[in-house]
Image: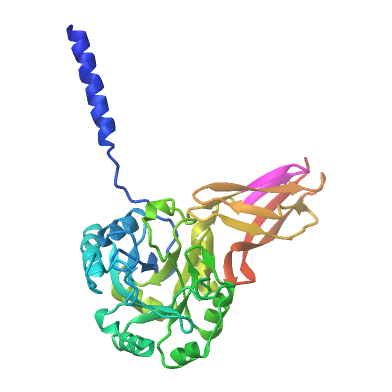
Amino acid sequence: MTKRVLLLFAAVATFAMGVSQGQVTRARSPIRIPDIPGYRTLKCDFHVHTVFSDGNVWPQIRAEEAWRQGLDAIAITDHIEYQPHKDDLPINHERSFEIAKIHGDDLGVLVLKGSEVTRKMPPGHFNAVFLKSSRVLDVEDWRDALRLAAGQGAFIFWNHPGWTGQQPDGISRWYPEHTELLEKGQLHGIEVVNGQDYYPEVHRWCLEKNLTMLGNSDIHDPAGLVWETGTVGGRPLTLVFATDRTPEAIREALFARRTAVAVNGMLIGRKEYLEPIFKGSIEVLNPSVTVRGKRSAFVQISNVSDIDYDLSGEEQFEEVSVPSRLVLKGGKTVLLQLQGKSETLDMKKTFDLRYVVTNLKITPDAGLEVTFPVSVTFAPE
């Protein structure tokens, strides 16, 4: 066998070995949503399951999934009552958190201790997060379970109120039991979004009853089978506006209702939080332009976030026409075209270009109103 043939075999073997090993780069894809004045914007998921209840993933994997997908914090919230894997794993309500936290600490992901109290509707399912002990919630009466959770200082929220498994028509309903919990101080928030489901009526309840808005995955399968990594349109998120990146700061922010929800490229929340997110994302690079006659000028708008902002407007001006719809693509600079209407104008004027950001929902029926002041110098062509 010639030396050339031996070298060829060696090269083929090396290539085949590399292919067979199929090495995967374990990398994090950060989600770019800006901080707001006075607070850090943390990306969180407070509804996560493992094999220690009805999930299909070992707890350690949940921590790395969260790290890869750009999250700051997750809560392990396995069911207390529902244990379909009990023939394969011992019922240990503390263990899934303990396992996930070890890897979370290694990766810098905050893993929080929670549990899901699982009952028929009413009152439905509830997550309690920041527990000291999960096993004490394993009691017969749901009122006792939530009372014991509240006694530990837990943050308690109502899960998937419109879940078709309990509400076949998909409509969320407020029952006397929920009024009872609210009056006892044992209901602090509700999932406005669960998975890919948005509940407009729950959005209204949170505004009317001053409750915290949450959006969570309720994930059971491996994350890679469900969403693309590092996209705002992928995994549902609760955005928490916290003073620091610590469990204590997250807990304080949740009780203070400083949250918004991200799902399917949409942000849902109070105006006081969505407006500074938008302002922190957007910069008009050239707020002064010149329009010559009926020619066009272009305003350049940069968006440093990962959110595609969908703008709609009906503004009409005598001197210049502006687009009625504009999409400010995430991570890009977009051109806003101004079209002159007269060949003879010779003047300077400032225009307030008013739009509604339709995918920033401050109520179920209203988007965020924004304004771009633009100074235009008109010159004859």
In which quadrant of the rendered view does residue 103 lie?
A: bottom left
Task: Identify which residue, 207 or 58, lies in the foreground.
Answer: 58
- In the image, farthest residue toward the top: 2
Q: Which residues are magenta?
A: 288-299
Looking at the rendered structure, the number of numbered marks drawn on it comes to 0
Left/right placement of residue 76 relative to residue 207 reads left
Q: Toward the viewer: 16 or 87?
A: 87
Dominant secondary-structure state across the stretch colored magenta: strand
The quadrant in which residue 17 appears is top left
- Whether residue 215 is in magenta: the answer is no
Q: Which residue lies at the image location 70% right of the left edge and 50% below the top edge?
A: 377
Query: The N terminus is located in which quarter?
Result: top left
Q: Quadrant of residue 42?
A: bottom left
Q: Position of residue 315 (x, y in %)?
A: 74, 60
Tell me if residue 167 comes above or below residue 302 in the rendering.
Answer: below
Q: Is residue 235 left or right of residue 174?
A: left
Image coordinates of residue 147 in percent, x first then y, are 34, 89
Quadrant of image for the C terminus: top right
Residue found 53% across the figure and 87% down from its top: 175
Image coords of residue 248 (percent x, y):
29, 76
| Residue lying furthest front | 87
Q: Is residue 293 magenta?
A: yes
